[in-house]
Amino acid sequence: MQNLDELLATPAQEWNDETILQLISSLRDQRERWGQEQREGGKKRVAAAKVEVKPAKRDLAFEGLKL
Amino acid sequence: MNYYNPTTDTISPLPPGTPIGIDEGQWEENTSFNSGVQFAWDATSISLYKTCPRKYHYTLVKGYVPRVIPPPLAFGIHLHTLFQTWHELVESGTPKDVALMRVTRLAGLLGETLPPGDTARTKETLVRTIVWYFDHFWDDSAITVRRSNGKPACEYHFQLPFMTYKGQTVYICGHIDRLVRWQGQTFVMDYKSTKYQLDNRFFAGFKPSIQIALYVVACHLIASSTSDLPPANGAIIDGIQLGVNFSRFSRQIIPYSLEEINEYIEDLQASIKQAMDASEAGIFIPNETACNNYSGCHFKDICSKPAARRETFLKGTFKQCTWNPLKPRT
């Protein structure tokens, strides 16, 4: 499965809505995991290569994005 | 250079739209000068002169800039473009969800034009920062002020008569990112990115500050002359810490009292007069105490050369483009 690092490395000219939804969703996953680490006082980095890209959904359950 | 139109979500080789890259412009006549003396001043010009008159002479008067834009400057320009695009879209009625997708696409496009060599200022950092920032401030309690004509006070270019110098009107110019109402008061808002921690030391860097004080003064002058903007009580700095794998945000108010504003106006008038006197006399004394500030002045090597050979080295090392405070950003 593709990770966030690989998705970010694709040329932005080729990004379609699907790609951008995946990007936003994955970046939010990354932020949540990073926030969790901060709250727990952990020093683990959450690199983009460690964030799995999931198939884009139109009914994304995170705050704000309602397409 | 291509252009991205966030309203239509299309890329084209011609304007309108946001340039995908940094258009530094060409070396052309600088209309902010009259007979070799600058009469329209912005925060960049004033800071340069106060830092080192010779650096001001090389940069503003002669137009010499590094051939490659330093990564922090390029990243900052792109970040401002993205915030501007967001506010334009949202203020024109585009739903936030759609605006986020458009600025994410633009962040990817702009990120690919960043100069290499800085692991905290990459395409990944830019895209991540923009998505995380708008998540963080999704329901922002800082509300954009409306101008007297009903338009949002975003990307506000000002050019105000400030003083006279030997019969010539002298202007202060600048570009306010956004004016906001927050907790019943009005503030100039600015975005500042850094690789360092967003601690008291970081925020202390914005007072005293030529740029922030100039913007607050401008709001007061506009309020008293045209009422297009309300007077500002100070500034809000949105600090953005850039890590290789994270972006962190912190917001702080930098208050400015009327007394401080009045003192700043007097100091600024004296500084501008000093700079205009020096320009008229053609004397730009270097300030050696500033040579090693930050990572070192980029003209340090030039100043180390014999005076007669400096121009040749300047031509060989730098490119020339015009910094004109009278020109609004496009």
Image (tube, coloured by chain):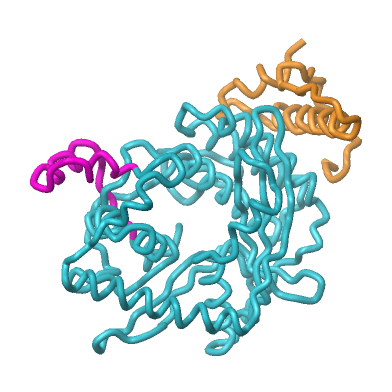
Chain colours: A orange, B cyan
| B144, B282: nearer the viewer | B282
Where residue A5 appears, as percent x and y from the top left, is 67, 19
| B316, B264: nearer the viewer | B264
The quadrant in which residue B224 appears is bottom right
**Quadrant occupied by the C terminus of chain B:** bottom left
- Count of all numbered marks drawn on residues in the image: 0
Q: Is residue A59 visible?
A: no
Instruction: Kindly give the residue lying farthest to the top in the view shown.
Output: A1
| B246, B273: nearer the viewer | B273
**Quadrant occupied by the N terminus of chain B:** top left
Instruction: Kindly give the residue lying farthest to the front in the view shown.
Output: B289
Q: Is residue B189 visible?
A: yes
The quadrant in which residue B35 appears is bottom left
| B301, B142: nearer the viewer | B301
Where residue B14 appears, as percent x and y from the top left, is 42, 44
Q: Is residue A32 left or right of residue B178?
A: right
Q: Is residue B102 left or right of residue B57?
A: right
Q: Residue at x 29, y 44 (%)?
A: B299
Residue B301 is inside the magenta segment: yes
Give the magenta-colored segment's residue range: B298-323
Where B109 sits versus B323, above or below? Answer: above
Q: Residue at x 76, y 16 (%)?
A: A50
Residue B25 is inside the magenta segment: no
Where residue B184 appears, as percent x and y from the top left, is 80, 76
The quadrant in which residue B302 appears is top left
Q: Residue at x 62, y 84 (%)?
A: B258
Where residue B245 appears, as percent x and y from the top left, is 69, 28
